[in-house]
Amino acid sequence: SALPNMNGHRAANTASLLPSGQVLICGGTKGNGNNELADVADLLGTSLNSTEIFDPATNSWSSGPNLPEPKAGHGAITLQNVLILLSGCITYTTIFGINFPDFSSQASTFDPATGSFSNAGNIRTKRALFAHALLPNGKVAFFGGVGGDILNFGPIKKADVFNPATNSASGIAPLPADRGFLQAL
């Protein structure tokens, strides 16, 4: 069945199922003035810090809390304690009204009970479009992705493990080769 339209255009966002059965949509990019991703510039400077929540009981969308930073191409994973970890991304900093794109290693958690975000440190490596997996011990492993700086970016082979209990990350053996646009199951 078709759902009602979201409140705004977005691509490269995440969707997370909440314990209530609602769905949290975070970040993404709005693209150019026509809401299109015609080239890389349409992605790099238009990351969103907004969220939306879909409620299947009412078949409606509502605005959620803002993210701590604009995020596109980021990761979202539900931790063992039901918090949702959002990490990494393509983001930007605005200086004198001009958006300067960058990659981020920032991590934050969303608490479904309070409906708010909290700072969770960083995942060690600035990256977007990466794979991540929840490990049996509650830690999160991150693999590859796209990183570097915005003038010299490409696939990376770095791998890290994030510990949500201490909000800290450490490096692990890298992938055998650079890999971007990964997915882990």
Image (cartoon, helix red, strand yellow):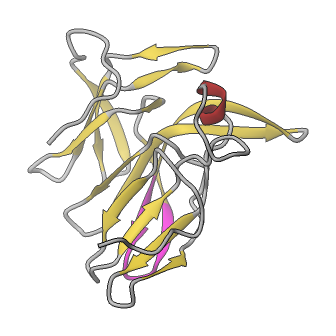
Q: Compared with residue 110, is residue 69 higher up or lower down, i.e. above or below? A: above
Bounds of the magenta segment: 108-118
Residue 31 x, y percent position in the rendering: 63, 42
Which quarter of the figure is the C terminus placed in?
top left
Image coordinates of residue 16 in percent, x first then y, are 33, 63
Residue at (19% x, 63% y) in the render: 80
Please identify the quadrant where the N terminus is shown.
bottom left
Left or right, 43 with respect to 14, comes to: right
Left or right of residue 3, residue 77 in this image: left
Q: Is residue 47 above or below residue 174?
A: below
Q: Quadrant of residue 36?
A: top right
Q: Position of residue 58 (x, y in %)?
A: 39, 90
Q: Give the percent coordinates (x, y) of residue 39.
A: 61, 26
For image coordinates 67% across by 38% down, the residue present is 92
Q: Residue furthest right?
A: 96
- Residue ID at (34%, 78%): 22
Residue at the left extreme, as displayed: 136
Q: Is residue 126 above or below residue 33?
A: above
- Quarter-wise, where is residue 172 in the image? top left
Of residues 9 and 142, the one drawn nearer to the viewer in this rendering: 9
- 181 and 121: which is toward the camera: 181
Q: Residue furthest bottom?
A: 58
**Front-most of 120 and 18?**
18
Number of labelled discs?
Answer: 0
Residue 165 visible? The answer is: no
Q: Residue at x 41, y 76 (%)?
A: 54
Main secondary structure found in the magenta portion:
strand
Residue 21 shows up from this direction: yes
Does residue 45 lie above or below 173 as drawn?
below
Residue 158 belongs to magenta span: no
